[in-house]
Image (cartoon, helix red, strand yellow):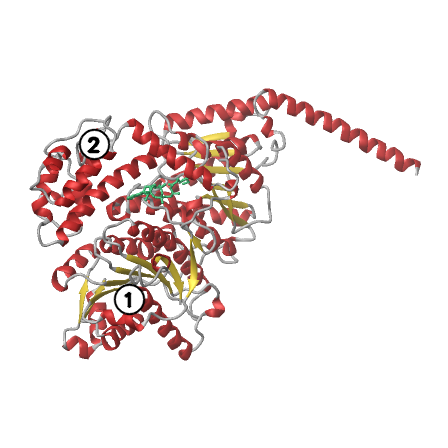
Amino acid sequence: MKTLDNQNQNGAEKALTSLAAFTQQYQRLEAGGLGWANHLIGLHEAKVALVTGGSGGIGSQIARVLAVSGAKVMLAARRTAQLSEVQAAIIKELESIGYADPAARVQIQPECDISDPNQVTRLVTHTLELFGQVDYLVNNAAVSGGEAMVMDLPLEIWRQTLDANLNSNYALLRLLAPQMKARNSGFVVNVSSYFGGEKYVAIAYPNRADYAVSKAGQRAMVETLARSLGPEIQITAIAPGPVDGERLRGSSARPGMFSRRARVILDNKRLNDVYTLLVKLQRTPEQTVTELLPTLLVNDVPAVMQDPRQPEALRQLATVIWEQSDPAGSSRSHFLNESLAHKLMGRLKKGGYLPTTSAASQPESVQPILAVAPPDPFFSPAEYEREGQGVQSRNLGMLYLKKMPTDLDLAITLAYQLADHNVTGETFYSSGGLRVERAVTEGELFGKAGHERLEKLQGTTIYLVGEYLQQHLTRLAQTFLDEYAVQRIVFLTHSPEAAQTLLEALPVHYRGERVVALATEGQLEVGFDRARQLYGPPVAIISTPFQPLPTCRLTGSSTGDWSQVLSPADFAGMVEQHITHHFRIAQKAAFLDAVRLVLVTPATDTHSSDEEFALANFIKTTLHAFTATLGAESERSVHYGAVNQVDLTRRARDEEPRNPSEAEEELTRFVNAVLLTSAPLPNPQESRYRSRIYRGNAITV
Ligand code: COA
């Protein structure tokens, strides 16, 4: 008993001594502005972290906090000077804490563009050479994207965003996973965004579809790969909303996030007002776009207001602009600036309102379009300020915690998460997440389209885009033609062979010229325009993928063989075929009046492998961000199309058709889902659910 008392006393003394040491350490850290590091020092000792986008913002703070926690860090980024500054600052802090050889602990890889696969390989090789291992991969680097509506977003920018923000994440993971798995130590964190959505919920991010899709893909990747990478490798995502830091506040080189959003809003509102006017006037018999355009490009708002020969709608727009704009900006007296004029011409050309030989055939050209270029500023500083303040206060009101985290807050949270060995496949939301009214939930197919709606398909033209889902495409064509008296089905395939096979599957209609087929052979947009020229615009477009999903493994074999595992190129190819493919079709559809666009995700059944099922879920989740965003944007468009997604991928494998009769039943359900989403919309008087039903839903067959 006595011995035990002595032991207790010794234990208590030791505890008191270490508490005193701890308090002393805290006081020392606090004096150096590092009080937050007290519990973290040593937490990640002997670990190696690779952090992309480490030259500023969240990335530099993550690298800093992990280094302070004892990890060796490699920071990669494009900006050399900033990266060196961050490196020097971290080394200084490590010195002040007392880490041995701090310079060797913090390495950088400058001029590293992670959207380039060669540079990704170089980064991984260099890191492994220096440190011998990577335990933590933090996929943080990201670009902002095109910050434009889908109808204006150039395909190259779309691809760049997906390469930088999404494909790069898989490429790095794929290169590092073999050694992580073999060493039984790996944690991958994708820095996504609240605008990447939540499980089964997509968030519309108008004017930023490329960014939203890349962020949804980062989150979906985590859900998809967690099972195959575990238990050795954990993979999670963090989804910050607005973060109080460099990116949000901006710098001398780049305006802050809310100011940039204000610019996008002001620009788009003006562009949409002018474009809407032209399209509406073109619909009337009096005036065509070609006749009106010269007046607009003279760019004189007061002159138009006072000229009774101008169409009433144009004079009204001029009056609204004059009365509502700030006199401190030239946007009051001019309809457009050069940049908006180029965008307008691009739209008019893409929408088929202008002959392709006009100046509009080169919307990206730097040739001035306007007769009078307005002096700067176009929108006044006060207008930017007001709009930016509006965005900021609306956004802060959406945060559950009513406060934004800082870059450092996020980095500290992440450092603690990396010490949790029992979590994978999850996404963590800072500030408790955002309340977003436009959240669109994935749903199951309920009911069928009303007969009175379907009857309106009679005599119309429908485009069916696709190649490998031949049974689905043929059944759709038969239903549209035989049951709903559609005048013509236009198949748009990739290859001439698929075009021929589809035509031959419908011999009677083929002979009667009610089905036609065009092979696009890599030139989707050209094929689409050709179809429009030959057969007129469609009332509905059903976009199915050209290729099936890759059938690769998602992790190495038990013997450590990774040669059969989905490569970075396979991953990028899948994103191109199943996501970008739909973007290209959607961009064409965005210029058609009241068109119903249906995006179809890959089919899986009981014969599909677990990997195909996992990838199909990745695609449907990622694509839903696009569908939801496009749905919100199309409500702001004069063309007011509807967009929905039909998922041939079920949530659970036991829902997949198991035998021919169930496969037949599923085919009928697929046709019903397409009918529901491609039939004409009820008008607002007929259904108050109109916008709820047609705003970017995803329906599982
Ligand atoms: N064409 C015409 N009008 C447009 C437009 C367009 N392309 N884009 C926006 N507008 C209009 C909207 O309709 C709205 O008009 P209203 O005031 O008459 O209703 C106005 O501009 C304000 O738009 P915004 O506040 O941006 O709303 P939104 O629905 O377009 O987007 C959010 C909502 C939340 C996405 C947006 O506020 C936002 O970007 N927030 C910041 C996001 C963020 O925190 N990001 C950090 C993590 S990545």
The residue mark sitting in front, 2 or 1, is 2
What amino acid is found at the position of numbered circle 1 in the picture?
Ala
* Number of disc labels: 2
Res 369 seen here: no
Q: x, y (%) of residue 286?
A: 8, 51
x and y, in percent, of residue 690 in the image? 34, 59
Q: Residue at x 18, y 76 (%)?
A: 509
Whether residue 270 is visible to the viewer of this picture, yes or no, is yes
Q: Is residue 5 above or below residue 173?
A: above
Which SS class for mark 1?
loop
Residue 73, given in percent of the width and then of the height, sits at 50, 34
Q: Which residue is labeled 2 in the image?
A: 332
* Residue 548: quadrant of the picture: bottom left
Mark 2 neighbour class, 10 Å CA radius: few under 14, some 14 to 19, many 20 or more: many
Task: Name the residue nearer the viewer: 83 or 27.
Answer: 27
Crowd band around label 1 with a 10 angstrom C-alpha radius: few (<14), some (14–19), many (20+): many
Q: Residue at x 25, y 74 (%)?
A: 484
Along the viewing direction, whichever of 58 and 389 lies nearer the viewer: 389
Q: Quadrant of residue 525?
A: bottom left
Would you identify the image quadrant in which residue 330 lies?
A: top left
Quadrant for ligand 1 reads: top left
- Residue at image point 49% right, 58% down: 557
**Mark earlier in primary sequence (2, 1):** 2
- Foreground residue among 137 and 121: 137
Q: According to the image, label 1 marks what residue?
A: 679
Q: Nearer the viewer, residue 496 or 378?
A: 378
- Does the closest atom of ligand 1 sit within 8 Å of the Cβ of label 1? no
The amino acid type, in three-letter code, at marker 2 is Arg
